[in-house]
Image: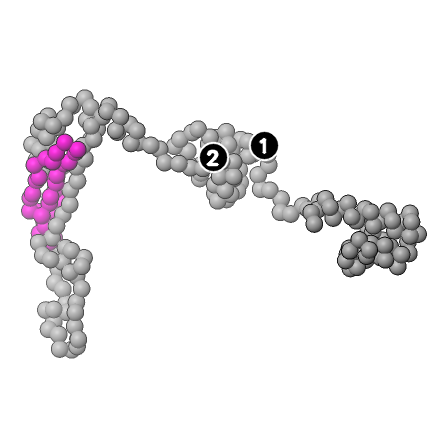
Amino acid sequence: MTRSERECLAKRIVQHYVNIANRRKKIIVNHFLQEKIPRQSIYDTIKKFEEFGAVGDRSRTGRPKKLSKQELTRLKRLFDHKACISLRQVVPDFDVHIITISRNLKAMEVPTRARRLYLTLFNGNVELVMDDEKYFLLHNESISANRGLYISDSNATPPAVKFKRTQELEPKIFVWIAISQNGISMPFFKEHQQAVTQMTYLNECIKRRLMPFIEEYHHKRKVLF
């Protein structure tokens, strides 16, 4: 039974109870039992009427909303069709938790979305070139899977196996390469103990390898590096 049907039935019971049954419960109960209304529902309706003078459902207040309609309108105006806006920036203005801001934006169908950079990259106006570099140690422990130790009896294991010797500045190999959809540049390898300097990166990676690669495979004006 819906809320409106329940309220309509309660009004009928009260009207019959006051105007016809002359407030005699037995008469009103027998009458509505013929309509297959549960006995307890009839008594509950009469009791509610006698205690409160009304039988309609009271408005349900519930937990008050943290943001008013005006604040929700302002929130939507701040974020809708906008970019580079942080939720944390507006939290002090509304004096609510950041989760409340996010939940209300989703409820207003203004969820966060990733900006579609690929539309710019693959519409033919730019040619994407990427580079990357990495340092590799000169032993097999540069691979995380090889750093473990397998022993059945730690007392019988030689100290050279159980304990690892390290240097303050271990020698390592620096590897650099550039790549695009048109090809791969000449890689650059160099053994170092410290990080590669700015001049080494500029001269060896950019000038001697990246620029010739771009000139050979790309149009300079369209390159996005």
Q: Are marks 2 and 1 in contact (CB under 8 Å)?
A: no
Residue 110 tag number: 2
Q: Is residue 81 magenta?
A: no
Please determine whether, in this image, residue 212 is positioned above or below residue 98: above
Farthest-out residue, front: 34
Amino acid, disc 1: Gln
Q: Which residues lie in the magenta part? A: 169-196
Secondary element under disc 1, as helix, strand or loop, is helix
The residue depicted at 78 percent of the width and 56 percent of the height is 36
Whole-Å distance between the Cαs marked 2 and 1?
A: 16 Å
Q: Nearer the viewer, residue 51 or 37?
A: 37
Q: Specify which label sits upstream in the sequence, 2 or 1.
A: 1
Secondary element under disc 2, as helix, strand or loop, is loop
Q: Is residue 211 left or right of residue 75?
A: left
Residue topped by disc 1:
70
Q: What colour-coding does the image apply?
A: one colour
The residue depicted at 78 percent of the width and 59 percent of the height is 40
Residue 73 falls in image quadrant = top right
Please determine whether, in this image, residue 108 is positioned above or below residue 6: above
